[in-house]
Amino acid sequence: MKTVLIRAAIPGDLVYIRALERQADTAAHWAEREYDALFAEDAPARVALIAVEEKAGDGIEGFVIARCAVDEWEIENVVVAEGKRRSGLGSRLVRELLQLARTRGATSVLLEVRESNVGARRLYEKNGFSQTGRRRNYYRAPAEDALLLRSSLRICDKIP
Ligand SMILES: CC(C)(COP(=O)(O)OP(=O)(O)OC[C@H]1O[C@@H](n2cnc3c(N)ncnc32)[C@H](O)[C@@H]1OP(=O)(O)O)[C@@H](O)C(=O)NCCC(=O)NCCS
């Protein structure tokens, strides 16, 4: 079995991140310029982690992107390649992100998810998130409520 490593994304990974996002209907879809701005100096602080197979050629297995405020981070997108799902990779990406947020002093990580995205909701719940609210008709095409989830990070917490 191949080892999958998780590391910070670099500008050269954007092409793979974009490609993976486009294959995932339920992912958050960003415009080209939003990805291009990810590494811009004046862009809001963000973290992008990718999952790559050790010694593999081009391509990635998954990614997570979060916006970083001082004490509150927000997961903006997480995607795992279709053929690699249900093997724990999404959880690894989310946990790495939570750990990074914790070590950088954040006290909570938030996100929004479509109510119908049961797989993503389970992934988040399994990794310590719980529902804190709902935004009615937040999403378009199709219109749907967003559920607001939060993971509170305390220094003494063990990663779930
Ligand atoms: C959501 C997503 C990232 C999960 O990635 P993953 O690598 O499959 O996640 P994991 O293997 O770590 O799964 C963790 C848990 O989440 C739950 N889960 C994940 N996918 C699920 C699905 N399709 N249906 C039901 N539960 C699911 C399960 O409880 C799973 O644990 P289990 O396999 O031990 O039962 C992946 O399905 C994906 O890329 N979806 C498309 C993009 C997307 O919707 N992103 C979320 C945007 S908010």
Image (spheres, helix red, strand yellow):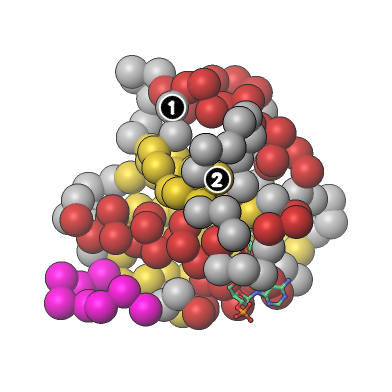
- Asked if residue 130 lies left or right of residue 117, the reply is left
Please tell me which residue lies in front, 108 or 119.
119
Q: Viewed as shown, does residue 131 lie left or right of 135?
A: left
Instruction: State the extent of the magenta-drawn residues as a range.
Output: 153-160
Taking the image as four quarters, which one is ligand 1 found in?
bottom right
Q: In the rendering, which numbered label is found on residue 53?
A: 2
Badge 2 density bin: few <14, some 14–19, many ≥20, Cα 10 Å: some
Spot occupied by residue 34 in the image (x, y as percentages of width and height):
56, 27
- Residue 63 visible to the viewer: no
Extreme residue toward the front, this view = 1
Locate residue 66, reporting x and y percent. Answer: 43, 47
In the rendered image, residue 85, in percent from the top left (x then y), is placed at 68, 63
Question: The N terminus is located in which quarter?
Answer: bottom right
Residue 23 in which image quadrant: top right
Residue 58 visible to the viewer:
yes
- Dividing the picture into quadrants, the one containing residue 107 is bottom left
Residue visible at 50% across and 43% down?
Answer: 54
> In the structure shown, which secondary structural element does the residue marked by tag 2 occupy?
strand
Label 1 element class: loop
Hey, which quadrant is residue 128 in on the image?
A: bottom left
Q: Nearer the viewer, residue 52 or 57?
A: 57
Instruction: Say which residue label 1 marks.
Output: 10
Residue type marked 2: Glu
Q: How many marks?
A: 2
The reply, left or right, for residue 107 in relation to residue 134 is: left
For label 1, being within 8 Å of ligand 1 is answered no
Question: What residue lies at 42% left-to-right and 70% top-to-bottom?
Answer: 150
Q: Nearer the viewer, mark 1 or mark 2?
A: 2
